[in-house]
Image: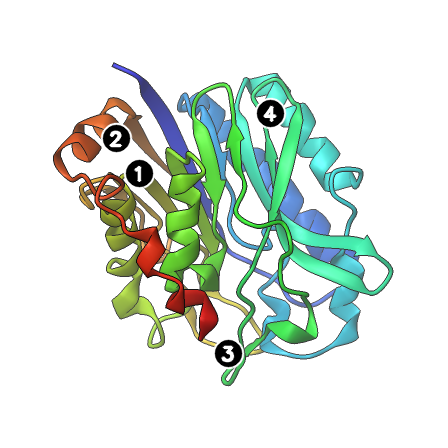
Amino acid sequence: MAVVRGGLIQAKQEEYEGSVDAIKQMMIDKHVALIEEAAAKGVQVLCLQELFYGPYFCCEQETRWYSLVEQVPNGPTTKLMMELAKKHSMVIVVPLYEEEQKGVYYNTAAVIDADGTYLGKYRKNHIPHCNPGFFEKFYFRPGNLGYPVFQTRYCQVGVYICYDRHFPEGARALALNGAEVVFNPSATVAGLSEYLWKLEQPAHAVANGYFIGAINRVGTEKPWKFGQFYGQSYFCDPRGEMLVVGSREQEEVVVADLDLDKIREVRNVWQFFRDRRPETYEQLVEL
């Protein structure tokens, strides 16, 4: 039996006041402690929440938040996470604000192997821009790296970020590229998408025969009063069954054991890959 212990970190952005640098350092320090907690719980593959080292600043359109960008993998946060991954023999998926070059920024997740090796990155492909409070096109270019899957020490990892989860096409592409566990780091609030939170991604897990780790932050971020991030980070299996669900309000490391043998077991019953008809799907990309 090939069992991997997965972990998800859901955390609060407690303070808005102060410099961008101070806010960033506070959140990094908080997550270093939570990563230590995950290591103590035996987590082997860990994912942090979307844009983990700051607030969900897309509630407003202010250029001050551009100063959160970093190079990936050469920026300080990726390097720090590489050290922590090696220290704990832990795969870490690190969502951050990436600078490709001056003025060209992406919503990105770096994937780091358990020996501290940087494996690559995923850039969020689907970028929302709508009221209330999702002004992401002000901050990010759409991703241009496709739907990569990373062979880590423990399993094959794919990443889909927040709004991406509303699009089944990329979820299928990750499966076709070999993903066994797909992480979706998110920032989403009650009253908008909560009714979809435990609907869409278990459906992706079933349609594609893989595990999903869905991460959402918790708390209310002042001064925007954008709404309450409702947490409830979870793992679901290839049958769409919830293995564990986090709190609505508390910071925590959500942990589950993922039996990768279940992927083959489920796919041998539901032969969705065998029965696909890609030659009939041209209209999906033509319209």
Q: Residue at x 15, y 40 (%)?
A: 270
Q: Where is residue 225 in the image (x, y as percent from the top left)?
A: 50, 78
- The correct choice, above or below, for 160 with respect to 80 in the image is below
Label disc, if present, on residue 263 of the rendered structure: 2
Identified at 52% across, 23% down, the residue is: 90
**Of the residues tagged 1 and 3, which is closer to the observer?**
1
Please name the residue that numbered disc 1 is placed on: 210
Q: How crowded is mark 4: few (under 14 residues within 10 Å), some or many (20 or more)?
A: many
- Which residue position is annotated with label 4? 85
| Front-most of residues 164 and 139 | 164
* Amino acid type indicated by mark 1: Tyr
Of residues 78 and 180, the one drawn nearer to the viewer in this rendering: 180
**Amino acid type assigned to the residue bearing label 3 in the image:** Lys
Q: Which residue occupies the extreme front position in the image? A: 279
Q: How far from the left and from the top, in percent, is residue 132?
A: 49, 84
Distance from Cα at disc 2 to Cα at disc 1: 6 Å
Mark positioned earlier in the residue sequence (1 or 3):
1
Q: Local crowd at mark 3 within 10 Å, few (<14), some, or many (≥20)?
A: few
Dot 1 alpha-carbon crowd within 10 angstroms: few under 14, some 14 to 19, many 20 or more:
many
Q: Nearer the viewer, mark 4 or mark 2?
A: 2
Q: In terms of secondary structure, where does tag 1 sit?
A: loop
Colour scheme in use: rainbow
